[in-house]
Image (cartoon, helix red, strand yellow):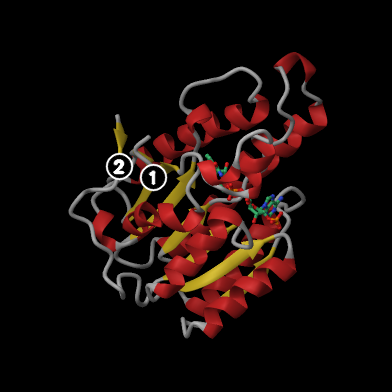
Amino acid sequence: MIHTLPDTFEAAPDCLQGKNILVTGAGDGIGRAAALTYARHGATVVLLGKTVEKLEAVYDEIEASGGPQPAIYPLHLNGAVFKDYEDLRDTLEKEFGALHGLLHNASVLGERKAIGQTSVDSWNEVMQVNVNAQFMLTRSLLPIMDIPDTASVIFTSSSVGRTGRAYWGAYAVSKFATEGLVQVLADELANTSNIRVNSLNPGATNTAMRRAAYPGESPDTNPMPEEIMPLYLYLMSDASREQTGLQWNAQNT
Ligand code: NDP
């Protein structure tokens, strides 16, 4: 069953006050919008991504709008090894004590080809960034997410991670793996932790990834990342503290 934003939810301006939230792929697209939105609602945001200039631009935007001072953590998810994630955890623990939210957003599209034509290098890169990095990041951060009385992990899925489709290759398979990780982790944590885990499909959104996947489509066919933020806020705020192990869609269509 697919869930959508409850009609009754309205994000209070300070609904993320006092929360420390890490966003991957925070420099562009949906991750950028989520980082800015979370900061606007009071969160201290850790901006993780691979292009430092983009992260700095988001940092400056948050500072200029008077949000809590964010932090930048440059990391190439395709090259990072588990020690890098442990170092990140140690840094966050030292600087912030605990983490209340983790948005797994960064992904790569890889080759849009038939499985029979997909290069092994492209397959491996997609699996490394979209699956292995998410596992390592989650595994290293769970201890500092277990400290607060409630914490939220959001994994980003896709419609091709729920029903397979020709020529979506490693990307689709990586999103199925993401859905599997959500189910296994949510089940494990349901009775042992205050950490909730959900899968969020943003739906077609006007970003660089969407434009690369559909070069023939007029970009303004789709909403801008800012327009799909209500569900991102709901799942990160305490309003969703009872929700775990579920599949969500940010758009109704
Ligand atoms: P974009 O390509 O616009 O942004 C992806 C972000 O991830 C960028 O900030 C990028 O950094 C970062 N990133 C990519 N590779 C790495 C890496 N190796 N290490 C660190 N950071 C990396 O994508 P979207 O905003 O469109 O997508 C966000 C999420 O939503 C993804 O998980 C995607 O699969 C999902 N999604 C998107 C849809 C859409 O229509 N847009 C539809 C369904 C799902 P940099 O800019 O520095 O390269």
Dot 1 alpha-carbon crowd within 10 angstroms: few under 14, some 14 to 19, many 20 or more:
some
**Residue 11: percent from left, percent from top:** 28, 64
Residue 250: mark in rendering: 1
> In the image, what residue type sits under mark 1?
Ala
- 217 w.r.t. 227: above or below: above
Question: Quick one: 193 or 105, which is closer to the camera?
Answer: 105
Could you tell me which secondary element the residue under label 2 belongs to? loop
**Residue 207: percent from left, percent from top:** 60, 49
Residue 150 in view: yes
Dot 2 alpha-carbon crowd within 10 angstroms: few under 14, some 14 to 19, many 20 or more:
some
| Cβ atoms under marks 2 and 1 closer than 8 Å | yes
Cα separation, mark 2 vs mark 1, equals: 6 Å
Quadrant occupied by the N terminus: top left
Quadrant occupied by the C terminus: top left
Q: Quadrant of residue 248?
A: top left
Q: Label 2 belongs to which residue? A: 4
Q: Quadrant of residue 110?
A: top right
Residue 98 in view: no
Q: Is residue 82 left or right of residue 163?
A: right
Could you tell me which secondary element the residue under label 1 belongs to? loop
Q: Quick check: is the Cβ at mark 1 less than 8 Å away from ligand 1?
A: no
> In the image, what residue type sits under mark 2?
Thr
- 92 w.r.t. 81: above or below: below
Q: Which comes sooner in the sequence, label 2 or label 1?
A: 2
Q: Is residue 240 left or right of residue 95?
A: left
- 53 w.r.t. 69: above or below: above
Residue at point 39% right, 45% down?
Answer: 250
**Residue 2: percent from left, percent from top:** 32, 33
Residue at point 23% right, 48% down?
Answer: 6
| Extreme-top residue of the structure | 116
Residue at point 59% right, 67% down?
Answer: 47
**Residue 167: percent from left, percent from top:** 66, 21
